[in-house]
Amino acid sequence: MAEYIEAIGRRKTATARVRIYPGQGEIVVNDKPMDEYFGRALDRMILMQPLNLTGTAAAYNISVHVRGGGEGGQASAVRHGISRALIKSDENLRPVLKSAGYLTRDARAKERKKPGLVRARRAKQYTKR
């Protein structure tokens, strides 16, 4: 294999290890083509955002290993990893990706359930009689 640039992206409980190689724009996620791995068009669009924004969609082949979380969290983790890898390849892309918010690790995660409640904050319905 050719020389690659590697970066890690995270979202919720998903972690993506992204490697970018010089190439024609092929994207492989967990040894499957991107279209096969991510069934929803929204997830594929999220994954492609940093490449489309920087105009580097056809400049790199991308190999991704992603684990944990659901489909949406995995797509966002891959986007985070691709953005970090692009910066390692070309530091001039940093301001564009940073202003779009693709370099910030989205720290939102599910809040834990509290004792005596139905969910994290939802309480049982009060009955007067």
Image (tube, rainbow, N blue to C red):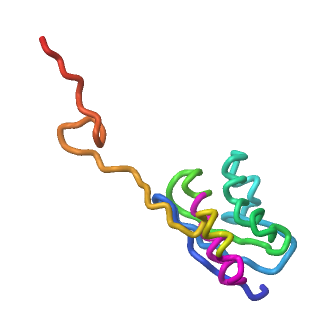
Residue 84 as seen in the image, left or right of residue 3: left
Considering every residue shown, the one lying at the far left of the view is 129
> Which segment is the magenta one?
76-94
Residue at 54 percent across and 55 percent down: it is: 73
Instruction: Tell me if residue 24 is in the magenta stretch.
Output: no
Vertical side of 125 occupied by 118: above or below = below
Residue occupying the point 74% across, 71% down: 62
Residue 37 sits above or below residue 8 on the image:
above
Of 107 and 69, nearer the camera is 107
Q: Is residue 89 magenta?
A: yes
Q: Position of residue 79 (x, y in %)?
A: 63, 63
Percent coordinates x, y for residue 100 in the rendering: 63, 63
Where in the figure is residue 45, as x and y percent of width and height?
A: 72, 53
**Main SS of residues in magenta:** helix
- Between 97 and 39, the one lying in front of the other is 97
Residue located 79% across and 87% down the image: 2
Q: Is residue 69 left or right of residue 89?
A: left
Task: Give the quarter of the figure containing the C terminus.
Answer: top left
Quarter that holds the N terminus? bottom right
Residue at x 39% of width, y 50% of height: 110
Please state the horizontal and vertical placement of residue 95, each as a whole percent of the image.
Answer: 65, 74
Q: Can you name the residue that lies furthest to the top here?
A: 129
Return the residue found at the far bottom. Answer: 3
